[in-house]
Image: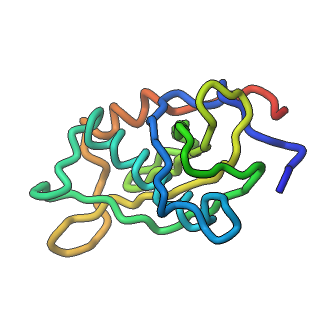
């Protein structure tokens, strides 16, 4: 699972704490690969709700995931406290590309990292719309232009 180019904590601007759950583990005794995507989704949406004011239940604008991928570097398992590091790699008119990494609590190197793309759409029509101003401001706050070198 090891990758010689592992992401480091300094490349991320926001952190979302996560506690692994018993059901996250697979038969091999570590968190199953598909669970990482739920961690990514939870971290991005928590940030949008808490910092950008996204109203997932009643807002006229919602965000759809259109692409995601994950690179695995080291296994995590239940029970562990982990953190999802979040940044914005690219900010468009109606879309945002996040960089997300999963870190063990207090560790510098990511256990996994990847990207996650949201497109903002009108709830009724499903058509892309510009990112709402408050959300755009929150996303700009974690936009990165330069990153620390990989470890």
Can residue 87 be spotted in the picture? no
User: Quarter of the image holding residue 122?
Assistant: bottom left
**Which of the pair 142/86 is nearer the observer?**
86
The answer to whether residue 112 is left or right of residue 143 is right
Q: How many marks?
A: 0
Residue 114's x, y, as percent? 64, 53
Placement of 20 over or under 7, stated as above or below: below
User: Quarter of the image holding residue 51?
Assistant: top left
The answer to whether residue 27 is left or right of residue 37 is right
Q: Which residue is drawn at 27% across and 35% down?
A: 50
Placement of 146 over or under 81, stated as above or below: above
Q: Which residue is drawn at 47% across and 63% down?
A: 23
Q: Which residue is drawn at 46% across and 43% down?
A: 19
**Which of the pair 38/25 is nearer the observer?**
25
Tell me the quadrant of the picture where the C terminus can be found.
top right
Q: Residue at x 57, y 62 (%)?
A: 25
Residue 13's x, y, as percent? 53, 27
């Amino acid at each position: 699972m090891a990758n010689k180019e592992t992401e480091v904590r300094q490349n991320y601007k926001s952190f979302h704490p996560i506690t692994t759950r018993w059901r996250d583990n697979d038969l091999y005794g570590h968190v199953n690969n598909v669970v990482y995507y739920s961690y990514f989704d939870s971290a991005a949406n928590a940030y949008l709700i808490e910092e950008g004011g996204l109203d997932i239940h009643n807002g006229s604008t919602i965000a759809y995931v259109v692409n995601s991928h994950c690179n695995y570097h080291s296994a995590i398992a239940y029970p562990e406290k982990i953190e999802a590091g979040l940044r914005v790699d690219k900010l468009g008119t109606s879309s945002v590309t996040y960089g997300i990494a999963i870190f063990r609590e207090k560790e510098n190197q990511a256990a996994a990292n990847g990207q996650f793309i949201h497109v903002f759409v009108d709830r009724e029509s499903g058509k892309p719309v510009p990112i709402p101003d408050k959300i755009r401001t929150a996303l700009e706050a974690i936009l990165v232009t330069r990153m620390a070198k990989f470890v």
